[in-house]
Image (cartoon, rainbow, N blue to C red):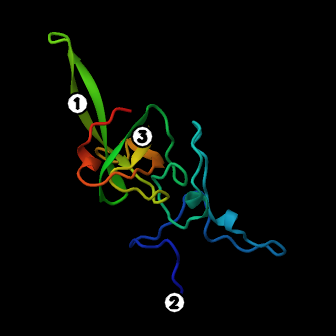
């Protein structure tokens, strides 16, 4: 039995914009371009080559799925990659206390959907864009990854303002 690429779920996975059961037209070959849907999200972000040539199927991917990026663009450090296709991003900022005329360090953790087009590890800096709610807590989608070479415990808890 032939193994279909990209099928690792119980339900049959397919892209919504591609008709799988199309008959072959005489004189015309079906190219790889005909079997894969992808788009540019705009806002100056390039579509990764792995999204164009890949075989993964992800309906929540901003490049190959049905999710549009609108609203805020944020940048943060990846703290956790333990969930499937979801990462946690730490955003550090300074909060001014008027009484003491000083700043205090604060942070927020943001869950974001990470498409299989990206390989992300803890400590990397990522840019995320706001989209419609994808789950109970996820409202952002990864658009770009900037790999970092930081070792040890400094990866997670180091205070970095972007």
**Horizontal side of residue 108 vs 20, given as left or right:** left
Q: Are marks 1 and 2 in contact (CB under 8 Å)?
A: no
Residue pointed to by mark 2: 1
The CA span between labels 1 and 2 is 55 Å
Check disc 1 and report the residue beneath it.
106
Q: Residue at x 37, y 42 (%)?
A: 133
**What secondary structure is found at the residue carrying circle 1?**
strand
**Residue on which disc 3 sits:** 132
Q: In the picture, residue 119 is in which quadrant?
A: bottom left
First in sequence: mark 1 or mark 3? 1
Picture quadrant of residue 15: bottom right
Which residue is painted at 37% across and 57% down in the image?
85
Image coordinates for residue 132, horizontal then vertical, percent:
42, 40
Q: Are marks 2 and 3 in contact (CB under 8 Å)?
A: no
Q: Nearer the viewer, residue 119 or 114?
A: 119
The location of residue 63, given as percent across then percent down, is 55, 51
160 and 25: which one is in front? 160
Give the left or right position of residue 40, taking residue 24 as reference. left
Secondary structure category for the residue under label 2: loop
């Amino acid at each position: 039995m032939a193994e279909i690429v990209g099928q690792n779920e119980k339900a049959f996975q397919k892209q919504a914009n591609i008709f799988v059961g199309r008959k072959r037209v005489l004189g015309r070959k079906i190219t790889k371009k005909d079997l894969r849907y992808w788009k540019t999200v705009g806002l100056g972000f390039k579509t990764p080559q792995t999204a164009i040539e890949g075989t993964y199927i992800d309906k929540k991917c901003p490049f190959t799925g049905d999710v549009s990026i609108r609203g805020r663009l944020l940048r943060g450090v990846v703290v956790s990659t333990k969930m499937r296709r979801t990462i946690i991003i730490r955003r550090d900022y300074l909060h001014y206390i008027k009484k003491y005329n000083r700043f205090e360090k604060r942070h927020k953790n943001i869950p974001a959907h990470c498409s299989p087009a990206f390989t992300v590890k803890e400590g990397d800096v990522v840019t995320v864009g706001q989209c419609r709610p994808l789950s109970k807590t996820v409202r952002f989608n990864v658009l770009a990854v900037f790999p970092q070479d930081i070792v040890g415990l400094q990866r997670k808890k180091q205070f970095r303002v972007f």
